Image: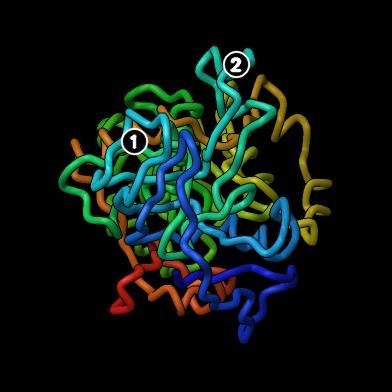
Amino acid sequence: MDAMCLETLGAISADSEPLVFKRLPTPAAAPGEVLIHVAACGVCHTELDEIEGRLPPAELPRILGHQVVGHIASVGDGVSIRRPGERVGVGWIASACGECEYCCSGRENLCADFCCTGLDIDGGYAEYMVVDARYAVPLPEGLEDIQAAPMLCAGAIGYRSLSLAGIENGQRLGLTGFGGSAHLVLPLARHLYPDSPVYVFARDEQSREFARSLGADWAGDTTDAAPQPLHAIIDTTPAWLPVVSAMSQLLPGGRLVINAIRKEDRDNTVLTSLDYPRDLWREKEIKTVANVTRRDIVEFLRLAAEAGIRPEVECFSLRDANRALVSLKTRQVRGAKVLVMDGDAAE
């Protein structure tokens, strides 16, 4: 099978080629697993963290990719919940123990044995991948492969972030950063909370205009003041400045939800500008998002199909994975980036 493999860690620059094209044996499904013939795989900012060593894979070489859509090619012994030919998706969650207090309370995202697709096991930057059958999620009709792929991470983690924000209809929501996840959260918020204004903070005018085109009530720069204080803000950036800026814009009792695995160390001195009375006092909260559950994926896919939510997608062939990653690194982002396996992707 064709695959793009990460063999060494290192910084990504404008002319980088961090992944290596390989011809590898097609894996076989072990007992309890399914073999998936991959049709499309979303490209996520987390892959930059993996490549650059902020979130290094368990071992190298590794096939990245955790927004995977495809059809089941075969099932391993003991698998009865999935069948060959079924269209499925695989998100960041590849498995969890199923027995700890977190798994038993619906919080498998916090399990100590949480296994990550494309980090702990090989992911979807390849023609085939294997995964625990319980974590291959059936996809609803009406979503094309390239539309469904970003929903498995960017959409699902955005849904979890919105749930943790805890707003009620009519309360004001902010989104700081407007990329693959936030551009799905905005229409979802519109669907779930039709009377809630949505304010977007983004550092470039192209992203702000994109947000306005999707129905944002207001869009400004990262440090601009919103027209009104906000009940909740979701941060999807890799930087610390939006965190500091967002805290000053919350109402008393407001909540900032940080949807990021890592923040860049180079700007952590910004944290010293936090002013306690202005930014943190009066019961403001900071809550982080950690991973996703299968339920997050299933519920978001259902809501997306129901509300007609579709991501804006830029497609690349599998062999162009490096170009997609560099584009993401250099913040050339509008919507989501997706690898397709048929070799005929057109931008």
Report the mark closest to the observer, 2 or 1: 2
Residue 95 picture location, percent across and down: 54, 34
Residue 85 picture location, percent across and down: 24, 47
Q: Amino acid at mark 2?
A: Glu
- Quarter holding residue 322: bottom right
Quarter the N terminus occupies = bottom left
Question: At x 51% / y 35%, what residue is drawn?
Answer: 292
Q: CA distance from mark 2 to mark 1?
A: 25 Å
The answer to whether one can see residue 189 in this image is: no
Q: Is residue 259 left or right of residue 152?
A: right
**Colouring mode (rainbow / by chain / secondary structure / one colour):** rainbow
Identify which residue, 185 or 130, lies in the foreground. Answer: 130
Question: At x 35% / y 61%, what residue is drawn?
Answer: 40
Question: At x 46% / y 44%, what residue is drawn?
Answer: 91
Total numbered badges shown on the rendered structure = 2
Name which of mark 2 and mark 1 comes first in the sequence. Answer: 2
Q: Is residue 305 left or right of residue 178?
A: left
Residue 252 picture location, percent across and down: 59, 23
Q: Is residue 6 above or below residue 79?
A: below
Element type where label 2 sits in the image: loop
The answer to whether one can see residue 257 in this image is: yes
Q: Amino acid at mark 1?
A: Phe
Which residue is tagged 1?
Answer: 300
Identify which residue, 347 or 174, lies in the foreground. Answer: 347
Which residue lies most toward the left here?
Answer: 142
Identify which residue, 282 or 121, lies in the foreground. Answer: 121
Which residue is tagged 2?
Answer: 99
Element type where label 1 sits in the image: helix
Q: Residues within 10 Å of mark 2 (few under 14, many from 20)?
A: few
